[in-house]
Image (tube, rainbow, N blue to C red):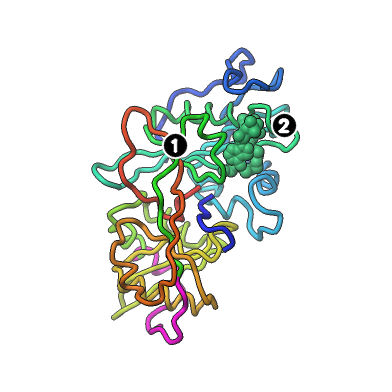
Amino acid sequence: MKTPVAGGAVPAVTSIASDDATTPTLASARSHAAAATPTPREVDRATVQRWLPQLDGWLLPGSAMYGVQHTWPQLYRSDGEGRFFAIVDGDELLSFCATRVVTVHGAGEPFAACLLGSVATAQKRRGQGLASAVLQHALAANAAAAAHTLLWAEQDGLYTRAGFVPGAAETCLVVARRPNPPTNGARLLVVGDHAAAHRLHQQKSMRVDRDLPTMSALLTTPGMTALGLERAGQLVAYACCGKGADLQGHWHEFGGAEDDVAALLQAGMHHLGQTDAIVLQPPWRTGLKKALGRSVVGEVAVAGPMQRSVGEALPACWIDGLDSV
Ligand SMILES: CC(C)(COP(=O)(O)OP(=O)(O)OC[C@H]1O[C@@H](n2cnc3c(N)ncnc32)[C@H](O)[C@@H]1OP(=O)(O)O)[C@@H](O)C(=O)NCCC(=O)NCCS
């Protein structure tokens, strides 16, 4: 979950292990692995559909207004691209994680990255090595598709053991609302804006590649406010705050020139009645802080996604909030 400040088409991959009970588990990684635990396997979307209420309970706070389907639509929507890995006992889900392989434009050539998330184990089976086993299975299944895996972790224990290292620090700007910002041209984004917003996204120097249908679906994510700034009949900027149960109060994705984004963020805070807000600042946006001017009242360094790379170092990159899982 990409929640940095508290409070506030998958390529073909190697074949996946079956239910074969002789497949080795991660017993070596866990001294107290449960005896006779079923082995991990890949499961299909229809199967996962039945478990969504369970995953809501395991992965989101009880107070969350939206479930996993709306929080990570790229994984769980019927048009999402998630791959799902689980340990099940009969029909009962014991442990789970999900992945999605994306093309990232960062420093250097575009590269494939596996975004991994929704790691969860049934309460009664925690501490028995199940999540570690599912994680290893998911990593192996995606190994041929991507040399790099990224995940947004709240704690690192499980992931450090699986070879993940802390990610590079990211910067969040704390922005206070200005009394009278120019709000001309700022409005809610409508479906007719999606193609222009998609063009603005694809112009970013660091991004995850998206096609227009994906972008359009993401821009209508429940629990998210998506605003646009129009000048002379053209959409020149867009900005998104919140995403399902995640990133509420955080402006986590925006497109357009720095001055236009800054103007839209100010207008957006008025639109949402925010007196202050967190803006996730992509490292390549070197002029945004200056464009926001005196409304930036703080700056917080937060850990970026944990990363695990095989054979090559992860190039500098940035994953917008709508892509995080
Ligand atoms: C985190 C979680 C998936 C671990 O599942 P598990 O099957 O118990 O994991 P394993 O038995 O393979 O490994 C247990 C280790 O995970 C680590 N761990 C516990 N909670 C963790 C967390 N939230 N994030 C990362 N690692 C965690 C601990 O180091 C623990 O080691 P210990 O038993 O020596 O203390 C499980 O506690 C869970 O479902 N929590 C709720 C959902 C959640 O927070 N998911 C993580 C999202 S980033």
10 Å crowding of disc 2: few (<14), some (14-19), many (20+):
few
Tell me, yes or no, if residue 164 can be seen here: yes
- Look at 67% across and 41% down and name the residue there: 51
Q: Position of residue 66 (x, y in %)?
A: 63, 58
Q: Which marked residue is nearer to the observer: mark 1 or mark 2?
A: 1
- The amino acid type of the residue labelled 1 equals Val
- Look at 41% across and 83% down and name the residue there: 181
Determine which residue is flagged by label 2.
125
- Look at 67% across and 45% down and name the residue there: 58
Quick check: is 192 in the magenta stretch? yes
Is residue 142 rendered to the left or right of residue 60?
left
Q: Secondary structure at mark 2?
A: helix
Instruction: Please name whichever residue, 202 or 60, is drawn nearer the observer in this view of the structure.
Output: 60
Determine which residue is flagged by label 1.
165
Note whether 192 is above or below 167 in the view shown: below
Question: What is the C-alpha distance between the residues marked 1 and 2?
Answer: 26 Å
Q: Is mark 2 within 8 Å of ligand 1?
A: yes
* Bounds of the magenta segment: 175-196
Q: Position of residue 262 (x, y in %)?
A: 36, 73
- The amino acid type of the residue labelled 2 equals Arg
Instruction: Please name whichever residue, 197 or 225, is drawn nearer the observer in this view of the structure.
Output: 225
Instruction: Please name whichever residue, 276 or 106, is drawn nearer the observer in this view of the structure.
Output: 276
Residue 196's quadrant in the figure? bottom left
Q: Earlier in the sequence, mark 1 or mark 2?
A: 2
Q: Are marks 1 and 2 in contact (CB under 8 Å)?
A: no
10 Å crowding of disc 1: few (<14), some (14-19), many (20+):
some
